[in-house]
């Protein structure tokens, strides 16, 4: 069965360009503000949206995304509210893929079967759950696949050729290559290193490879997009949201437009890169 992710990456490949993948945390700083930004992402150039599931202990994330989770939780965010955001988005947009990204704990507490049924009904396309290794695929990955959801796995610079087959065994949708060692937002990747890593991963899979961690400018986005099937930006967008909050923690008037203007500039970097490279 062809999913929204499969269709989107196939369409972009046919157009000769890379995917721009954006990350925001659900309900950051609150439900309504988060929805205003979420609904504007496709028009700003986002091809695939990663929506963070707020969690108290996001251990793989840097200060920016940790703070976004805390803001969301302070506003009362729950996993059900995250799914409600997707439902509301789907009322007007049935094409842009949405991937929920986060940690297993909230899903476990809801119950895997209940969560997967709700995610499917809401219009979720895939999952990235960073603290479930391939050895625990029966916990969530395999049930998610049976439910028709893509399960996207992370590969890193330390994922060697012996480990890659296990990482890729049940991966679908795309492979998320973490271009640096460390937490999100902590450094910037080098395009030359990324190109070599993507080539190595592609020797093991036909799936698209999207690259994230450390991309903050249109120039960096363009460089990475020229070396991969997708460029992922999270911390820079989350920082832009934080910069638009008033003293009470609410999004300022015009704040969403400011964030989406940054997204648009990054999208132009991504989309210009692959077209130029293909000519």
Image (spheres, rainbow, N blue to C red):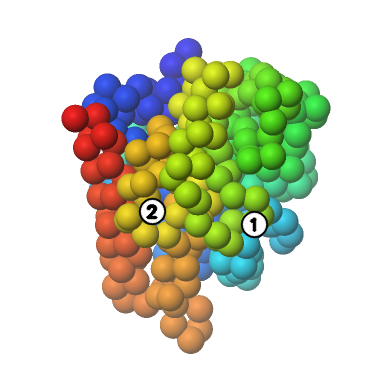
Provide the secondary structure element on which disc 1 rests. Answer: loop
Q: Is residue 1 left or right of residue 133?
A: left
The answer to which image quadrant residue 17 occupies is top left
Specify whether residue 22 is in view: yes
Task: Give percent across and percent down for residue 75.
Answer: 58, 69
Q: Which residue is mark 2?
A: 220
Residue lying furthest top = 1
Q: Say if 91 sits above or below 267 in the image.
A: above
Q: Say if 250 sits above or below 173 in the image.
A: below
Task: Give percent across and percent down for residue 66.
Answer: 63, 64
Q: Residue at x 50, y 46 (%)?
A: 212
Number of the label disc, if any, that sits on residue 75: none
- Counting labels gives 2
Number of the label disc, if any, that sits on residue 183: 1
Q: Is residue 34 left or right of residue 155?
A: left
Specify whether residue 83 is in view: no
The answer to which image quadrant residue 114 occupies is top right
Q: What is the C-alpha distance between the residues marked 1 and 2?
A: 18 Å
Task: Give percent across and percent down for residue 14.
Answer: 27, 22
Q: Say if 279 sits above or below 2 in the image.
A: below
Residue lying furthest left = 279
Q: Say if 29 sits above or below 140 in the image.
A: below
Provide the secondary structure element on which disc 2 rests. Answer: helix
Q: Residue at x 24, y 43 (%)?
A: 272
Q: Residues within 10 Å of mark 2 (few under 14, many from 20)?
A: many
Q: Residue at x 42, y 64 (%)?
A: 33
Quadrant for the C terminus, please.
top left
Task: Give percent across and percent down for residue 211.
Answer: 49, 41
Give yes or no for contact between labels 1 and 2 (Cβ–Cβ under 8 Å).
Answer: no
Of pointers 1 and 2, the one earlier in the residue sequence: 1
- 108 or 179: nearer the viewer: 179
Q: Residues within 10 Å of mark 1 (few under 14, many from 20)?
A: some
């Amino acid at each position: 069965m062809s999913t929204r992710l499969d269709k989107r990456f196939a369409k972009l490949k046919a157009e000769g360009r890379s995917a721009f993948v954006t990350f925001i945390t659900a309900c950051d700083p609150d439900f309504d503000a988060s929805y205003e930004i979420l609904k504007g992402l496709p028009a700003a150039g986002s091809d695939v949206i990663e929506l963070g599931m707020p969690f108290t202990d996001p251990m793989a994330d840097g200060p920016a995304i940790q703070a976004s989770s805390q803001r969301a939780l302070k506003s009362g965010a729950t996993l059900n509210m995250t799914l409600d955001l997707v439902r509301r988005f789907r009322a007007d947009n049935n094409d842009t893929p949405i991937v929920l990204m986060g940690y297993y704990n909230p899903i476990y507490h809801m119950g895997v079967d209940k969560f997967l049924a709700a995610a499917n009904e809401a219009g979720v396309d895939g999952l990235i759950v960073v603290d479930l290794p391939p050895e625990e695929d029966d916990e969530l990955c395999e049930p998610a696949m049976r439910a028709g959801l893509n399960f996207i796995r992370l590969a890193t610079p330390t994922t060697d050729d012996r480990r890659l087959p296990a990482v890729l065994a049940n991966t679908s949708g795309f492979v998320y290559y973490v271009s640096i060692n460390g937490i999100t937002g902590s450094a910037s990747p080098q395009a030359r290193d990324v190109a070599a890593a993507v080539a190595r991963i592609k020797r093991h899979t036909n799936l698209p490879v999207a690259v994230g961690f450390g991309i903050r400018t249109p120039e960096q986005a363009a460089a990475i997009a020229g070396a991969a099937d997708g460029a992922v930006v999270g911390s820079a967008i989350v920082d832009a949201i934080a910069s638009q909050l008033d003293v009470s923690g609410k999004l300022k008037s015009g704040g969403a437009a400011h964030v989406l203007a940054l997204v648009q500039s990054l999208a132009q970097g991504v989309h210009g890169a692959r077209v130029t490279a293909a000519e």
